[in-house]
């Protein structure tokens, strides 16, 4: 058997193994339920760990937004779009948003986190 035939045989074996991969299925909570769970966890975190309940310390989130502003403007725009933040406010730092806008931004990030947990794991890139 030559090298090409051996490689073809191995590839066919792998393809047969991959044939056992199931279609996508999510048997857990819905995206909305997962997002609300993350939002509830954020509220509990505020009530337990922050003295100022109206304006908790979100330095990590503020830093993340600045990081995205410098490194991935499209990802930041996606978050602001999901949050319903007007485009003329996209240049604001996190601390410059009002309480309701901050809540919307946090909810948008929680939506992305919930969605990321549901993404399929065995994705093949067309080549």
Image: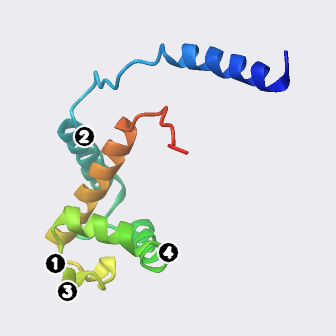
Q: Mark 3 sits on what residue?
A: 88
Say whether residue 103 is visible: no
Residue that appears at 30% across and 79% down:
95
Q: Mark 4 sits on what residue?
A: 71
Residue that appears at 15% across and 68% down:
84
2 or 3: mark nearer the eye: 3
Q: In this view, does 1 lie above or below 85?
A: above
Q: Mark 1 sits on what residue?
A: 86
Of callouts 2 and 4, the N-terminal one:
2
Q: In this view, does 88 lie above or below 68?
A: below
Of 12 and 37, nearer the camera is 12
CA separation, marks 2 and 4?
A: 29 Å
2 or 4: mark nearer the eye: 4
Per the image, label 3 sits on a secondary structure element best described as helix
Of callouts 3 and 4, the N-terminal one:
4
Q: Is residue 25 above or below residue 120?
A: above
């Amino acid at each position: 058997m030559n090298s090409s035939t051996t490689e073809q045989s191995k590839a066919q074996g792998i393809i047969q193994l991959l044939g056992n991969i199931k279609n996508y299925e999510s048997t857990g909570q819905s995206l909305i339920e997962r997002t609300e769970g993350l939002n509830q966890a954020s509220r509990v975190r505020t009530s337990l760990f922050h003295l100022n309940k109206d304006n908790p310390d979100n330095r990590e989130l503020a830093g993340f937004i600045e990081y995205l502003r410098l490194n991935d403007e499209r990802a930041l725009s996606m978050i602001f779009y999901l949050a319903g933040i007007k485009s003329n406010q996209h240049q604001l730092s996190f601390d410059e948003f009002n309480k309701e806008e901050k809540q919307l931004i946090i909810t948008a990030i929680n939506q992305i986190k919930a969605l990321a947990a549901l993404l399929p794991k065995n994705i093949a890139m067309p080549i």
